[in-house]
Image: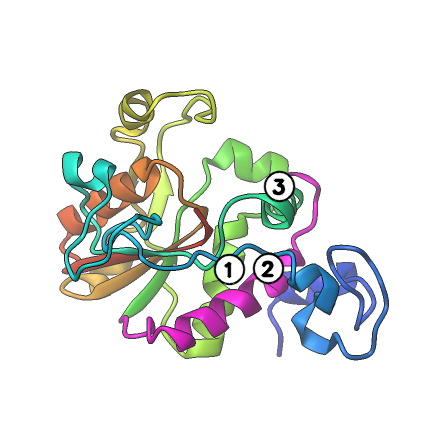
């Protein structure tokens, strides 16, 4: 039986075979949730990439880092993102988060699933999302990263872990510098129900979020997980 949340979200879906982007109806769309014309406009991230954060770089080597990752040490192993944060993807993520379109998790989840399989990025013990602060969760009604993480967990049969909670209501980061973001997020996360989450100790965890910008959120979450005893943290986002 479907969970309550998934059943509720089913009621909000646009009609099957309807493009989530332009709303055109086409029977060939099926469960891709996007028409061919809109899909052609998606900008994928192409190599060569930084081996840490997957930022496009001008050179290729097995251990090449972008300037930021060369200066700032990151606690996670690596980040993988299929799309560049611009155009249709940027607008769709904004709608997903702020325009009450929780059903977009299947649209993005399908892309992430295929991307993970394509690059063999599936060898994890647990999947967990970046959490929202309870005040934001209350106003929005859902955590987009949680919806994505649960979707991928179900499709890949990797256990879902409700591992993190946001203990600090941080200020909006979009207008902040990298250093300001790091200070803003310091101590913002904690382990949720430590006894229940004992099972994630000594394991590899995939951390799921919507967008990777400076890496401050992913890094702070990773530090929290590693301090608890997780062996390695990997990161997956829709875009960067």
Q: Quadrant of residue 165?
A: top left
Q: Are marks 3 and 1 in contact (CB under 8 Å)?
A: no
**Whole-percent x, y for residue 100 in the image:** 70, 45
The residue where tag 1 is placed is 148
Depth order, front residue of 120/140: 120
Q: Earlier in the sequence, mark 2 or mark 3?
A: 3
**Whole-percent x, y for residue 170 in the image:** 41, 25
Q: Residues within 10 Å of mark 3 (few under 14, many from 20)?
A: some
**Whole-percent x, y for residue 49 in the image:** 31, 54
Instruction: Decide if residue 198 is in sight here.
Output: yes
Instruction: Decide if residue 8 is in sight here.
Output: no
The residue where tag 3 is placed is 94
The magenta span reads 97-124
Separation (CA) of disc 3 from disc 1: 15 Å
| On screen, residue 100 above or below 151 | above
**Whole-percent x, y for residue 216 in the image:** 31, 36
Q: Quadrant of the N terminus?
A: bottom right
- Horizontal side of residue 232 vs 18, given as left or right: left
Depth order, front residue of 163/103: 103
Q: Which mark is residue 129?
A: none
Q: Quadrant of residue 131?
A: top left
Q: Earlier in the sequence, mark 2 or mark 1?
A: 2
Residue 237 is a magenta residue:
no
Q: Residues within 10 Å of mark 1 (few under 14, many from 20)?
A: many
Q: Are marks 2 and 1 in contact (CB under 8 Å)?
A: yes
Q: Which mark is residue 105?
A: 2
Q: Main secondary structure of the magenta part?
A: helix
Q: Residue at x 65, y 56 (%)?
A: 41
- Horizontal side of residue 156 vs 224, given as left or right: right
């Amino acid at each position: 039986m479907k969970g309550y949340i998934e059943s509720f979200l089913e009621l909000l879906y646009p009609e099957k075979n309807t493009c989530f982007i332009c709303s055109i109806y086409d029977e060939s769309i099926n469960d891709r949730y996007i028409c061919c014309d809109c899909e052609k406009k998606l900008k994928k991230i192409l190599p060569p990439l930084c081996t840490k954060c997957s930022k496009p770089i001008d050179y290729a080597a097995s251990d090449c880092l972008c300037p930021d990752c060369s200066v700032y040490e990151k606690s996670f192993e690596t980040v993988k993102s299929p799309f560049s944060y611009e155009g249709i993807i940027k607008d769709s993520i904004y709608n997903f988060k702020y325009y009450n379109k929780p059903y977009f998790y299947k649209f993005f989840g399908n892309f992430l699933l295929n991307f993970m399989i394509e690059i063999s990025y599936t060898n994890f013990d647990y999947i967990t999302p970046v959490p929202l602060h309870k005040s934001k969760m209350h106003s929005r009604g859902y955590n987009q990263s949680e919806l994505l993480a649960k979707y991928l967990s179900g499709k890949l049969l990797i256990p879902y872990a409700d591992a993190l909670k946001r203990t600090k209501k941080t200020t909006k980061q979009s207008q902040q510098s990298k250093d300001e973001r790091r200070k803003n997020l310091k101590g913002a996360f904690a382990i949720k129900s430590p006894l229940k989450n004992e099972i994630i100790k000594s394991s590899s965890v995939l951390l799921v979020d919507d967008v990777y910008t400076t890496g401050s959120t992913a890094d702070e979450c990773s530090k929290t997980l590693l301090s608890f005893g997780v062996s390695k943290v990997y990161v997956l986002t829709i875009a960067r």
